[in-house]
Image (cartoon, helix red, strand yellow):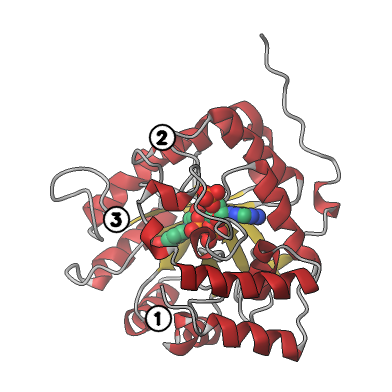
Amino acid sequence: MIEEIYKADSRRYEAGMEYRRSGRSGILLSELSLGFWHNFGETAPLERSKDIMRFAFDHGVTSFDLANNYGPGYGTAEETFGFVYEKSFRPYRDEMFVASKAGYDMWPGPYGNWGSRKYLMASIEQSLRRTKLDYFDVFYSHRYDPETPLEETLQALVDIVRQGKALYVGISRWPVVATKYAFSYLRERDTPCLIFQDRLNLIDRRVESDGTLANVRENGCGFIAFSPLAQGILTNRYLNGIPSDSRAMQQRFLKSSQISEELVAHIGKLNEIAANRGQSLAQMSLSWVLAHPGVTSVIIGCSSVGQLEDSLKAMKSKDFTTKELADIESIASQIKL
Ligand code: NDP
């Protein structure tokens, strides 16, 4: 059967998506980005991945977040992206902002991990081949490497931009002191850090307390939040047991042992607040991150078009009353994972 040619929805920029400036740059990112960490690897149905990507783009998502090792099956989420990109998205390349990263274990031996120039240079070549892209919009150092001189990692990022393999540089999960150094190193070489990526959700607010958010803001850098739903905990997913197709059942990064009775009781209370706001818990959790000062975009993961459709509605209700915020905080602060 010949597959129908994809034509993006002509009203995609009227779906209610806000586009927020990343720090002091010229780049506007959709406030919701689509993440490929889970659900797009070799075990995920290709049709579903394609449907999710198309639905996202049709509803105003322009920002797509990849990394070399996303799968499962390292590299396979980038391969899925590349397959769908070639079939559906090539005509829309200039409307898309695509990120990839390197920093975690990717291939065997001493050159497939951490922050050496050798690893970053080889990895971006591989990522470009898998995604079928000519360049990434932003390329990240995925984690801080305490052994490699920071200058080596940072200069590799600068050179990646100078070689035209990426337009901008990003940093993910670096400690504050190293990030300060990175910001000045990159700025002095006319490659200012576009965006910083770290975890932020109702139950993990470390980036506020350790100075990450303040540092990013002071340096004119954007901030993009990952795991806004705490990998699915901050949704209705686990309110009535652990579904067999859920992330907690995969026992990889989220374990079923974390879904305790006490946790579910707290989540139930958050769910009631969300219901009183006329939102699903996923929507309220996303709205909360979106309402957070200094957030440029929030990266959502999803395992179905239905979840994506639900999550995208978070854009509609980003205002919270003082009481709602206090009630949320009082419950969320009791949650220990
Ligand atoms: P979330 O916290 O948003 O969790 C996503 C999971 O929540 C989904 O897989 C699904 O679980 C569940 N879910 C999503 N939407 C709904 C909904 N509306 N209703 C009910 N359940 C829902 O995000 P991730 O942890 O996946 O992180 C998002 C992205 O951030 C990643 O894909 C990646 O791009 C990036 N990231 C970056 C990291 C870094 O080091 N820089 C680290 C981690 C993530 P289920 O699968 O069970 O259906």
- Mark drawn on residue 104: 3
**Residue 211 screen position, x and y as percent:** 45, 88
Give the residue drawn at x 40%, y 64%: 258
The alpha-carbon separation of the residues under discs 1 and 2 comes to 31 Å
Q: Quadrant of the N terminus?
A: top right
- Mark drawn on residue 129: 2
Q: Which residue is mark 1?
A: 184
Closer to the chain start, of discs 3 and 1, is 3
Amino acid type at circle 3 is Tyr
Q: Nearer the viewer, mark 1 or mark 2?
A: 2
Q: Residues within 10 Å of mark 1 (few under 14, many from 20)?
A: some
Is label 1 in a helix, a strand or a loop?
A: helix
Residue farthest along the left direction in this orientation: 109
Amino acid type at circle 2 is Arg
Closer to the chain start, of discs 1 and 2, is 2
**Residue 127 screen position, x and y as percent:** 40, 42
Give the residue drawn at x 76%, y 81%: 320
Q: Find residue 237 and report its image quarter.
A: bottom right
Amino acid type at circle 1 is Ser
Closer to the chain start, of discs 2 and 3, is 3
Q: Residues within 10 Å of mark 3 (few under 14, many from 20)?
A: some
